[in-house]
Image (cartoon, grey):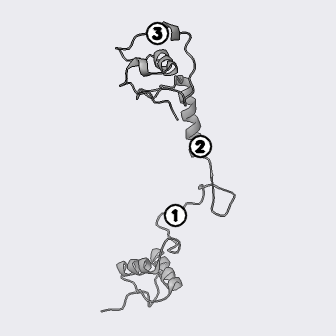
Amino acid sequence: MSLKINLDRSPDRVSDKEYKILQDQGNLPANWPFRPELSGPPERVSINDAANTGTVNTANISTEDLKAELERRKALETIPTIGDKGGIQSDEGEEEEEGEEDYDDGWNNEQRRAELAGRELSIDGNKDEMIARLIRSDEDKLVEGDAAPAS
């Protein structure tokens, strides 16, 4: 958590630590006096103690450090994730072919019937029969009885 300094209060109501942080970072408000007794070589301030004044990079992090952190975070995005059954699983090589759907996971019978009706196919049968009909439709391998009855 970063240090938040209320700059609306008078300078005499700010702690020496807060005043020094603002002064070292060059974030002192224009109407606040410079206090030489607090000056010295600027300290490298922890991000948790850096004043949060709304300005960029108040933690005094170098450009090189910021770039390194960005690269580290980008690298984390490509790390394989742990699957629901344990172990490391990568998304590579597991992509379904375009248009290929198993109609099982994430589908309920109402959704299957709506999909079948939209394709003008029979909505009769149990889950396995509806899934088989949808897959045959995807593969253009419909059989007799797959079409919806004429109304």
Q: Quadrant of residue 116?
A: bottom left
Mark sitting earlier along the chain (2/1): 2
Distance between the alpha carbons at the discs numbered 2 and 1: 27 Å
Which residue is rendered at x = 45% and y = 21% of the image? 14
Query: Dot 3: what SS?
Result: loop
Which residue is rendered at x = 56% and y = 33% of the image? 69
Residue at the far front: name it: 13
Query: Dot 2: what SS?
Result: helix
Number of other residues with Cα within 10 Å of mark 3, as a class: few under 14, some 14 to 19, many 20 or more:
few
Q: x and y percent of residue 43 in the render?
A: 57, 17
Nearer-the-camera pick, 92 or 46:
46
In this rendering, does residue 27 appear at all?
Answer: no
In this rendering, does residue 113 appear at all?
Answer: yes
| Mark 2 lies on residue | 76
Residue at the far left: name it: 151
Q: x and y percent of residue 131 in the render?
A: 50, 80
Amino acid marked by disc 2:
Leu
